[in-house]
């Protein structure tokens, strides 16, 4: 009877330990499901018409990485507990195979997390996705030419391509927060970077970025015909106008005669014509689009460029009017 009681206690203890170990593995699975439930980045406030929430990027990374680290700590604690519960020889192949099984659960969760994060980008960046723009750049008039902020020139140090690549890096860095339980294996981050499917998705994101940037650069080139307006300060423009008696002819925008005209300073009629030209140009610029979308997902806010160009044209008109006030009405 004592033997039966003893065996019952032994079996109950074994069953309890196995069940506890099994529950720990289930908890590992649940932890990774929670960690991979959402993509790293989403549209602001999860609204379909909002841009990707870059303003909350730092907070998003802190929240995600903290959760991943906490999960990593719990996973290692549960593995250590399971080694005790199962009376395992941690150097035995059987235990190493067991840890490898748990390692596969963790890796699977991280793959789902990265895939889900990349899928959100791809599903919102596809040219035929028919969704609201995901990113935005500012089109500006800076350093004598039309530029974007961030830059759409791939070689620039602060380009949109660099921004996109840093976001992709953020996704993979999350895997660093969970140490690999098996010694000698590549880190989860390295394993994910070598994952064929994820690598293809990442390359596709970069390709879409490069194509949209190229489209944006092509669009900015269409404004080169207005370059003569901003390449000359209003004072310089007025001096040339006074010297040569009028603005360049339409066929030769930005060019002036080499010698002043024989009839001297421009007449009031010339002034009025040039002022009228400025007003026409203002109307044309006001008609420029406030936004332009490249690739179906990269929106350009063109208002800074429009405002800068309008100011230049208005300053030209103001310079002409002020000259008339100072040199005609005061005579």
Image: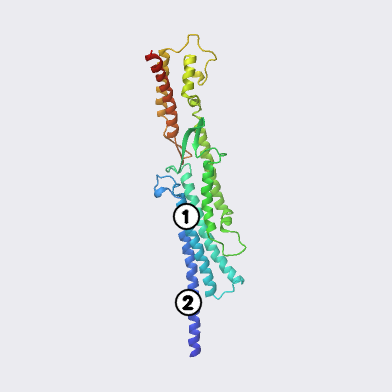
Mark 1 Cα-neighbour bin, 10 Å: few <14, some 14–19, many ≥20: few
Q: CA distance from mark 2 to mark 1?
A: 38 Å
Q: Is residue 301 above or below residue 176?
A: above
Q: The residue tagged with tag 2: helix, strand or loop?
A: helix
Mark 2 Cα-neighbour bin, 10 Å: few <14, some 14–19, many ≥20: few
Nearer to the camera, 203 or 302 = 302
Query: Which dot marks residue 248?
Result: none
Q: The residue tagged with tag 1: helix, strand or loop?
A: helix
Where's residue 161, x and y in %? Answer: 53, 42
Mark 2 or 1: in front is: 1
Where's residue 283, x and y in %? Answer: 39, 25
Q: Is residue 75 above or below residue 124?
A: below
* Residue 248 visible in the current orientation: no
Q: Is residue 159 above or below residue 21?
A: above
Question: Which of the 4 image quadrants contains residue 282?
Answer: top left
Q: Is residue 246 above or below residue 208?
A: above
* Residue 323 visible in the current orientation: yes
- Which residue has dot 2 on it? 16
Where's residue 172, x and y in %? Answer: 53, 53
- Which residue has dot 1 on it? 62
Nearer to the camera, 141 or 160 = 141
* Residue at position x 54%, y 70% in the image: 80
Exactly how many numbered labels are in the figure? 2
Where's residue 212, x and y in %? Answer: 51, 39
């Amino acid at each position: 009877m004592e033997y039966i009681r003893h065996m019952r206690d032994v079996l109950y203890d074994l069953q309890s330990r196995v069940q506890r170990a099994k529950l720990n593995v289930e908890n590992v699975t649940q932890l990774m499901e929670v960690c991979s439930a959402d993509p790293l980045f989403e549209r602001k406030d999860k609204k379909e018409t909002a841009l990707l929430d870059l303003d909350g990027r730092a907070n998003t990374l802190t929240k995600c990485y903290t959760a991943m680290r906490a999960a990593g700590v719990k996973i290692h604690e549960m593995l250590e507990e399971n080694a005790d519960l199962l009376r395992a020889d941690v150097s035995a192949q059987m235990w190493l195979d067991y840890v490898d099984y748990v390692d596969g659960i963790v890796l699977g969760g991280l793959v789902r997390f990265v895939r889900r994060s990349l899928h959100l980008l791809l599903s919102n960046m596809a040219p035929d996705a028919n969704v609201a723009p995901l990113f935005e750049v500012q089109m500006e008039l800076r350093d004598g030419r039309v530029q974007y902020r961030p830059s759409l020139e791939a070689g620039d140090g602060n380009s949109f391509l660099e921004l996109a690549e840093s976001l992709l890096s953020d996704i993979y860095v999350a895997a660093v927060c969970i140490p690999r339980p098996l010694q000698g294996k590549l880190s989860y981050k390295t394993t994910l970077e070598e994952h064929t499917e994820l690598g293809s998705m990442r390359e596709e994101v970069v390709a879409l970025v490069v194509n949209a940037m190229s489209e944006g650069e092509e669009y900015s080139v269409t404004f080169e015909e207005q370059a003569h307006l901003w390449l000359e300060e209003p004072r310089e423009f007025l001096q040339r106008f006074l010297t040569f008696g009028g603005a360049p002819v339409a066929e030769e925008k930005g060019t002036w005669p080499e010698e002043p005209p024989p009839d001297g300073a421009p007449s009031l009629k010339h002034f009025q014509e040039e002022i009228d030209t400025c007003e026409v140009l203002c109307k044309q610029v006001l008609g420029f689009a406030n936004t332009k979308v490249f690739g179906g997902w990269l929106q350009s806010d063109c208002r800074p460029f429009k405002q800068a160009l309008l100011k230049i044209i208005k300053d030209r008109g103001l310079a002409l009017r002020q000259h008339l006030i100072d040199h005609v009405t005061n005579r």
